[in-house]
Amino acid sequence: MKFVSFYHIKFTVLIVISYLMLGCVKDVDLDQREDISLSPDLQIDLLIYDIDQSQFEDVATGNLKTRISDTVRLEFLDDDYIQKDLSSVDFYFRHINTFPRAIDSRIRFLSEANTEQFTVNYVIKPGASGNPITTERSELIDETRINLVRRSIKMVVELEVQPGTAAFEGDLNFASKGFFSFEF
C-alpha cells in the first residue's frame, strides 16, 4: 500500500485551485477598464436669504430703494472636478413672497474678471401678508453650454421692485440649489 504524504495532498490542492482560478479569468477582457464611467450627481445649496422691507429702505432718505443686489463667490466652481468632469447643471431658484408687488429677479453668473457668463431672469409674483406666493424657476445648463459654468465664480442676485400703490411691507425668502452631474 502506497502512503500519500501531506506534502502531496497540499501540492495537488494548490494545482487544482490554480487551475480553477485561471479558468475563471480566461473570459475577462481587461481592456474594457477604459470603458468604465461613473456618473455621480451632487446637490449643492448656493444661496439662501430672508429679507424684509428694511433691506429696501434708503437709510439716508428713508425712501424705498427699488433695486438691491448682492454678490456671492462660489469658490467650489474653481475645483478640478468642476473644471474637468462636470457634464451638466440644473439650477433651481425659489422665492416665497409676501410683498404686495411683483419683483423682477435677475441672477447673473460672472467670471473672475466680472464678465457675464449667463443670466437667469424671471418675475417674482406678488403676495400678501398671510398669503405667501411661491415662484420657482429652473435653468438647465447642458453639456453644450457647460463652459459657461466652468468660467463662473460669482453669482449676483439683483431684485427690482415694480411700481405699485400698496404699502411695501412683507418678507422675501430665497433658496437656490445646483444639481451637478459629473462624468468620470
Image (tube, rainbow, N blue to C red):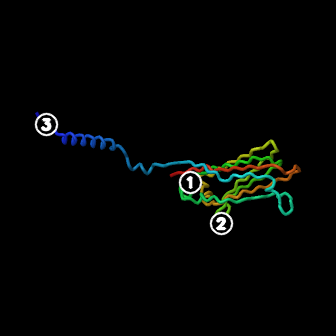
What secondary structure is marked by label 3?
loop
At 33% from the left and 44% from the top, the residue drawn is 25
Q: CA distance from mark 1 to mark 3?
A: 68 Å
Q: Nearer the viewer, residue 8 or 77?
A: 8
Check whether the beta carbons of the residues at disc 1 and disc 3 lie within 8 A of each other.
no
Please, is residue 115 above or below residue 144 in the view? below
At 71% from the left and 46% from the top, the residue drawn is 136
Q: Is residue 120 left or right of residue 37?
A: right
Residue situated furthest front in the rendering: 6
At 76% from the left and 55% from the top, the residue drawn is 159
Circle nearer the N terminus (1, 3): 3
Kind of residue at badge 3: Phe
Q: Is residue 7 left or right of residue 25?
A: left
Kind of residue at badge 1: Leu
What secondary structure is marked by label 2?
loop
* Residue 122, horizontal then vertical, whole percent: 74, 51
Q: Nearer the viewer, mark 1 or mark 3?
A: 3
Q: Which residue is mark 1?
A: 86
Circle nearer the N terminus (1, 2): 1
Kind of residue at badge 2: Ala
Residue situated furthest left in the rendering: 1
Q: CA distance from mark 1 to mark 2?
A: 22 Å
* Residue 23, horizontal then vertical, whole percent: 30, 41
10 Å crowding of disc 1: few (<14), some (14-19), many (20+): many
Q: Which residue is mark 2?
A: 113
* Residue 44, horizontal then vertical, whole percent: 61, 51
Q: CA distance from mark 2 to mark 3?
A: 86 Å
10 Å crowding of disc 2: few (<14), some (14-19), many (20+): few
Circle nearer the N terminus (2, 3): 3
10 Å crowding of disc 3: few (<14), some (14-19), many (20+): few
Q: Which residue is mark 3?
A: 3
At 45% from the left and 49% from the top, the residue drawn is 35
